[in-house]
Amino acid sequence: MGYGPTYGTRVLAFLLPFLLLPGLVRAQPVEEKVPPPPLTRILFVFDASQSMFGRWQSDMKISIAQRLLSEMLDSLSQVENLELALRVYGHQKPFPPQDCNDTRLEVPFGPANAKRIQHRLKTIVPRGTTPIAHSLEAASGDFPECDRCRNIIILITDGIEECGGDPCAVSRSLQKRGIALKPFIIGIGRNFKKEFDCVGTYFDATSEQAFTTALNVVISQALNSTTAQVNLLDIHGKPTETNVNMSFYDNFSGKLKYNFVHTLNARGLPDTLVIDPLLEYNLVVHTLPPVHKDSIRLTAGKHTVIALDAPQGDLSLKMETTQRQSRETRAIVRRAGDASTLNVHYVNRSDKYLVGRYDLEVLTLPRMYIDNVDIRQSHTTTVEIPGPGIAVIQKTTQGFGSLYVERDNRLEWVYNLADDQPQESLLLQPGRYRVVFRPRFARSALHTVEKAFEVSSGKTSQVYLYK
């Protein structure tokens, strides 16, 4: 009975997706996932000490600060990816007596809570003292755990620390622990720059207009995107080097903030990076060896070009060998004249190095030492390593012995034989060798035997100690 064309058509229809699947898989583009921007969290630390009742410009300081901050909150209520909170000090206990624990988180972080902060601001009445250090330390608990958050503190005050605390030390601790970025301070009424420079970035608000300007600048710096590009310069000073990871560290805390694999865009120019402008950075570019640039400062809202010398060439180690042997054979790479290990380089592959001279220690048996290998700009330096041969050493008994290579009529130690194995197979570089051996239970040195043999690339040498 024939199946006819209908059966063949069904079979082809069934198999067709599987026949096309490899091609379809290869054709699928890699989906580029851009990570979401970090959540920005701003904590306002608001001074409600008794001195805020003082007259200033058109009204009392407390009234002006409440009004201007409330107006700023109107503009922030529509900003995406932003959460706000309010901590107040000096508003719970009257002065005197002095209560240096008078600080409280009035509105915790949450989405769309600008209205809650505005409402609470209206009801605050100045009463007490100025525990700034204690308030900043308490603020460390105001930021819930978050993996991708920018934590910012904005302190608004008309005075300095009155409780013997050290706001500078507390601020440094917050930054070192990665709890918050360098705080902003807006000083109302007179200049407190000398007292607050060590705490954070200080803005002087000696007038209502200056207060408004300071608030606008602070919020702008906290929210505006800032761009940068890293120019990795070749030996001619051109930004042509690329495809290497770059790590940005917080200069103050030492914490890792960003990793970017350097990229040239479609126009052949270094790609633009979006980086938080509120930090000072140390940059490590992971070339071999790495290059560094410290104390990098960005200006909020402006594009910054960061240039580093990173001229590179390629080093290729070639050896005619099997794939397994290739995986097992490596070379230690060091800067010429420097004993520290820079890289462990696998044979039959190419790696980039900064332009310069390098010493190689190839981990073959015996080891090979190749000094002053010259790496040049955009050039591949190829080092040929002779392919190994195999020596099968037949001992027939357990014992003690070593393998030596013969050079200039002298023996150079290569390898100690395993004393509990009657046979060993070793990958050896081409050359003349000698085995010196004594059985384990022989009681006289006269029982020492030796055997000379040669190894050639790609060949196996059978070495019989007792034949």
Image (tube, helix red, strand yellow):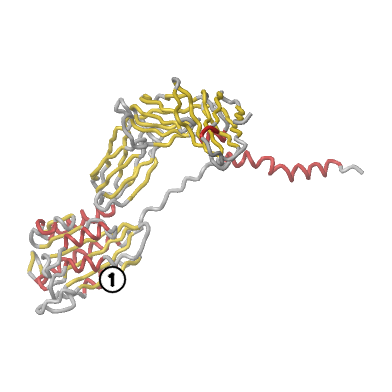
Q: Is residue 32 visible?
A: yes
Residue at image x 29%, y 57%?
178
Drawn side of residue 364 relative to residue 322, left or right: left
Expressed as whole percent of the image width and height from the top left, the position of residue 416 reads 49, 36
Quarter occupied by the C terminus: top right
Q: Is residue 326 above or below residue 303?
A: above
| Front residue of this view, candidates 336 and 147 | 336
Question: Residue drawn at (7%, 69%), measured in percent from left and top?
Answer: 55
| Horizontal side, residue 169 vs residue 346: left or right | left
Q: Looking at the figure, which quarter contains the N terminus?
A: top right
- Residue matched to label 1: 107
Q: Is residue 382 left or right of residue 167?
A: right
Above or below, comparing residue 196 to residue 459 in the picture: below
Count every numbered label the image shows and give the total: 1
Location of residue 239 by image quarter: top left
In the current view of this chain or complex, which residue is farthest to the right? 1
Counting from the top left corner in percent of width and height, residue 396 is at 62, 37
Rendering quarter of residue 356: top left
Is any atom of residue 80 visible in this view? no
Residue situated in front as seen by the camera: 108 or 113: 108
362 or 200: nearer the viewer: 362
Q: Is residue 464 above or below residue 44?
A: above
Residue at figure coordinates x 22%, y 66% from the top left? 137
Please tell me whether mark 1 sits on a helix, a strand or a loop.
strand
Vertical side of 127 occupied by 263: above or below: above
| Residue nearer the viewer, 456 or 220 | 456
Q: Which kind of residue does numbered mark 1 sit on?
A: Val
Where's residue 17, x and y in %? 69, 44
Instruction: Decide: few, some or many residues near mark 1? Use Cα within 10 Å; few <14, some 14-19, many ≥20.
Output: many
Residue at x 41% of width, y 34% of height? 332
